[in-house]
Image: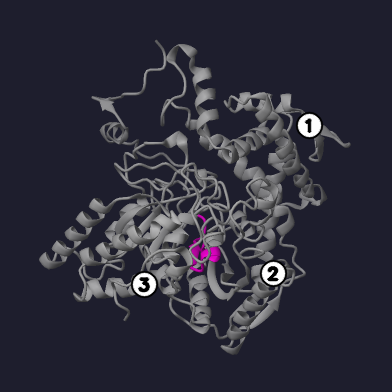
Amino acid sequence: MSPSHDADAGRPGPTALDPRAVLAVAKLARLDLDAACATREAASLLRVLEHFSVLDALDLAAAPAETPAGVATLRPDVPRPAAERDAVVAAAPRGSDDLFVVPRVIE
Amino acid sequence: MSDPLSSDAGVASIAAAVRGGEASALAVTEAALARIAAHDPAISAFLAIDGDGARAAAAQLDAGLAAGTVARESPLLGVPVALKDNVCVAGGVTTAGSRILEGWRAPYDATIVTRLRAAGAVVLGKTNLDEFGMGSSTEFSAYGITRNPWDPSRVPGGSSGGSAAAVASGMAPLAIGSDTGGSIRQPAAFCGVAGFKPSYGRVSRFGLVAYASSLDQLGPLARSVEDLALAYRAIAGHDPQDATSSGEPLALPTGSGVAGLRVGIHRDFLAALPHAATRAAIEAAIAHLVEDGARVVNLDDVDLLTREALAVYYLLASAEASSNLSRFDGMRYGPREAAEHDGLEAAYGATRAKRFGAEVKRRILLGTFALSAGYHDAYYVRAQAARRLLRAAFERAFERADVLIGAVAPEPAFPLGARTEDPLTMYLGDSLTIPPSLAGLPALALPCGMDGGLPLALQVIGRPFDDARVLDVATAIERRTGLAHRVAPPAGFGGAR
């Protein structure tokens, strides 16, 4: 997306949003939007992006580098036994022996 | 003890009655199903009602109790529970309120479902929600709106609006919701019930349809804090199936009083509120705590970044949503909107464009933009840094206070349709629930009054993993307000008692 900015390129605070740019982002997001929809979304997204300029006033250099203690909850990154193949296949909507059965996508 | 078959019977009284043999689990379930049949046509809280499954589960519980194979001390014995429809139940349709999951049947139970059943709960069905949890009014469900039981011309809040409305109208004594930026607390506030978002990592999300994984949290809604605590005890705890599930020791509420408690207040959550009646009701509740021995600490000198939090949230949550929802493409999940000869990309694009709703597409676009080359640093990286600042600010605040008490939302439930065409105004309504979500804090919404026929609510926010204290403080407030176990009068929504 290529929103226009007042100044200081690369920082939030766009003043315009081209519907063609919305279509480009939609393609990245695998969404087929028509031109009318892209125009509507451009106006809506612009208003939201304008609001995001409130972050400009923050001194982000003062942000801690790490997540404060007590908030990080990811489990230890250590080797563990892999899941049992039969259990994994059994959890799929459809399976056959040790394979997943999926909808055909290529003729 | 209230009649366990009545609409205002709570979790504790139902479990006690079933435990003591005063009522069977089947009779309690039948009573709940009858109320759903009478009231839900006017409210539309439920997307699916599993009457047969609920009756079978209740009968099995009764048989197990008679045979001695079901533990009588099970905390949720015979308690009917409604599940937000982004929680997987094996074999049942799970839509997340979206057409892209229309008809999709979950292959397994979410951990929270397994734990609720192990505690004796009976699943009644699935409740309505804003699509994938993206909304604050339950008007963005692909399957229709839900109405507020206190005033059917108003929204029930969202995104767990169906769960909140089911509890408020007496159709279920307990419901499960999910909260990413306020989706348990805000609908609980709008519907006059209690809702609890536990600390991030405290309740397993295995089997929850993901929206924003660094924020999503499951939790209960009920008509008293005691009932929330019973449900919390059943669902909290480590789960190896969820990589973000915490191994922190689980503390349970003790029922201790508030003597010596340091109650933090902050202008953004109280003094600056535009709604005078909400402000007055919260101040009255805090005054009760002071009478009971608590001390008020003013935290206005700490910038809790409530203004910036909204931007941080909508950037990060949308970015995570754009990634999480990329799996919904008509191949791996749900129906497809293209012929096979159209090609894979065309099938993806057509299916997602047709089957995602407007708000979901808006957030996917926003998130994809925030993550795209050239804008990643300007938006996503800056939002992550701001989130760390916000967390640090709450840490500083909690050095001087044990809890923070303020509002859940700037004002009570708004009229249906008032904000659907104005996304930013809808987002701004979440400004007081989002900061605790970004900091991973436990936060609880609790009724504290009425104004013009609409419920008012306050929010109790605690330190990370200090969930038990949040529940204890809420219990102390509820004891003074006397607003537990309220059910919206059926006359208000046209249902028959």
Q: Amino acid at mark 1?
A: Pro
Say which chain tag 2 marks. B
Residue B249 appears left or right of B265: left
In the image, residue B168 sits, relative to residue B125, either above or below, namely below
How far apart marks 3 and 2 lie (CA) works out to 31 Å
Q: Secondary structure at mark 2?
A: loop
Q: Residue at x 60, y 44 (%)?
A: B317
Which residue lies under the disc numbered 2?
B275
Residue B432 appears left or right of B49: right
In the image, residue A4 sits, relative to residue B278, either above or below, namely above
The part of the chain drawn in magenta is B188-200
How far apart marks 2 and 1 lie (CA) works out to 37 Å
Which residue is farthest right? A7
Which residue lies under the disc numbered 1?
A3
Which residue lies under the disc numbered 3?
B10
Residue B172: x, y in percent? 37, 63
**Which quadrant of the figure has residue A100?**
top left
Q: How busy is the neighbourhood of tag 3: few (under 14 within 10 Å), some, or many (20 plus)?
A: many
**Which quadrant of the figure has residue B119?**
bottom left
Say which chain tag 1 marks. A
Residue A36: x, y in percent? 68, 27
Q: Are marks 3 and 2 in contact (CB under 8 Å)?
A: no
- Pointer 3 or 2: first along the chain: 3
Q: Residue at x 29, y 41 (%)?
A: B91
Q: Amino acid at mark 2?
A: His
Q: Residue at x 27, y 53 (%)?
A: B51
